[in-house]
Image: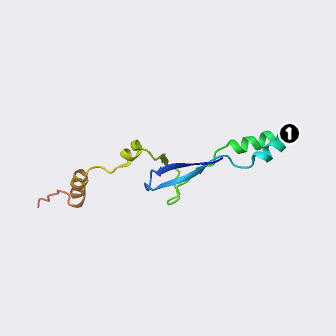
Amino acid sequence: MSSTEKLICGDCKAKFDVETGKRGSSFVEFILWSTLVIPGFFYSMWRKRKPKKYCDYCGSTFLLPDNYETQAMLKPMGTKIGTEMKKKIDKPNITYKL
């Protein structure tokens, strides 16, 4: 029983789907619990532990849910501000007196 979860990478802003669900087999878990209690406990704990999710494109672990709020947060700032900052960085206003 797995489902897909839509995520956005916070670093490269790529959108992708991730399969979510338990690892392993329910049948094996049942057999281990019915015959051997201690291995059944450890197997259940292993199945419930969530694997770490990585970006498919850049490998980052900074993943955010794909919703409207996240998209608004990751939207680039206005071009006017970026253009003014670029002009200041490219041509600093420095005067030399001789």
Q: Position of residue 24 (x, y in %)?
A: 73, 49
Q: Is residue 21 left or right of residue 25?
A: left
Comparing 93 with 37, the one in front is: 37
Q: Is residue 23 left or right of residue 79?
A: right
Q: Position of residue 37 (x, y in %)?
A: 85, 38
- Colour convention of the picture: rainbow
Residue drawn 20% across the image and 60% down it: 91
Q: Position of residue 46 (x, y in %)?
A: 72, 44
Q: Is residue 90 left or right of residue 18?
A: left
Comparing 61 with 69, the one in front is: 69
Quadrant of the drawing holding the C terminus? bottom left
Q: Position of residue 10 (x, y in %)?
A: 45, 50
Q: Is residue 53 left or right of residue 80?
A: right
Residue drawn 24% across the image and 57% down it: 86
Question: Quick check: can you spot residue 39?
Answer: no
Q: Label 1 belongs to which residue?
A: 34
Residue drawn 77% across the image and 42% down it: 42
* Crowding near the residue tagged with mark 1, few <14, some 14–19, many ≥20 C-alpha atoms within 10 Å: few
Residue drawn 52% across the image and 55% down it: 55
Question: Quick check: can you spot residue 48?
Answer: yes
Residue furthest left in the image: 98
Residue type pointed to by label 1: Ser
